[in-house]
Image: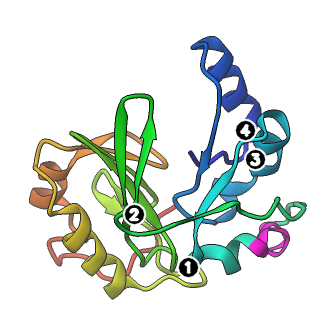
Amino acid sequence: MDPGEEPERFLAEAVRVDRRITAIWLTHAHFDHILGVAAIRAATGAPIHLHAGDRGLYDQLAQQGAWLGLRATAPPAPDAELVHGQRLRVGRIEFGVRHVPGHSPGHVCFVAPGAVLSGDVLFEGSIGRTDLPGGDFATLIASIRRELFSLPDATIVYPGHGAPTTIGRERASNPFLKGAVGPSRPA
């Protein structure tokens, strides 16, 4: 999932745990989450899965890099479209795809029993940025409440950056979701 700036770490970890990368699932198409897609695809041949709402961002990887003063080339075209309600498997674990826009138009989370891979939607004590192209604060808050706060409190949230948290902890104390903080600009 989300092979960002260090694809060699993904490949090394797959070797270390004796697993084969058979698919590339993308939570969204911001630079720091897709920069390594081409390298992972070249090394594994794994198909790329992306929500259609983020295809525009995905196709603008070079421009995203230029905003940050970095060089990037266009990644390979996605092979499969992620859709809300879709079911995906990794071994015996089934994940549900949930469309959670607001950080980006096509952001998705992957939900398994007791866990959610949240990308850049929900963090410990924070939420994803909404000041980037395609971001919208009200949409993000509504998405989190609808798609993530419907999960049990004990559900562990594994964000795209930072430490894990739980749905219950964020429901009880996240200042963005309790209305104490306005539009986000965290990293």
At 63% from the left and 12% from the top, the residue drawn is: 16
Query: What mark, if any, has residue 36 been given in the picture?
Result: 3
Point out the tag, 1 or 4, that comes first from the N-terminus: 4
Q: How many marks?
A: 4
Q: With 64 as the anchor, is 30 left or right in this view?
A: left
Q: Where does label 1 land, which residue? A: 53
In the rendered structure, does residue 38 fall within the stretch colored magenta? no
Secondary structure of the residue carrying tag 3 is: loop
Instruction: Tell me the magenta residue range.
Output: 59-68
Q: Amino acid at mark 3?
A: Gly
Alpha-carbon span between mark 1 and mark 4: 25 Å
At 77% from the left and 34% from the top, the residue drawn is: 44
Q: Circle 4: is it few (<14), some (14-19), or many (20+) Cα within 10 Å?
A: some
Alpha-carbon span between mark 2 and mark 4: 21 Å
In the rendered structure, does residue 63 fall within the stretch colored magenta? yes
| Marks 3 & 4, CB-CB < 8 Å contact | yes
Choose top left, top right, bottom left or bottom right for residue 48: bottom right
Secondary structure of the residue carrying tag 1 is: helix
Colour theme? rainbow
Q: Where does label 4 land, which residue? A: 6
Choose top left, top right, bottom left or bottom right for residue 57: bottom right
Point out the tag, 2 or 4, that comes first from the N-terminus: 4
Query: What mark, if any, has residue 77 been given in the picture?
Result: none
Residue 123, position as x, y percentages in the image: 35, 54
Secondary structure of the residue carrying tag 4 is: loop
Alpha-carbon span between mark 3 and mark 4: 6 Å
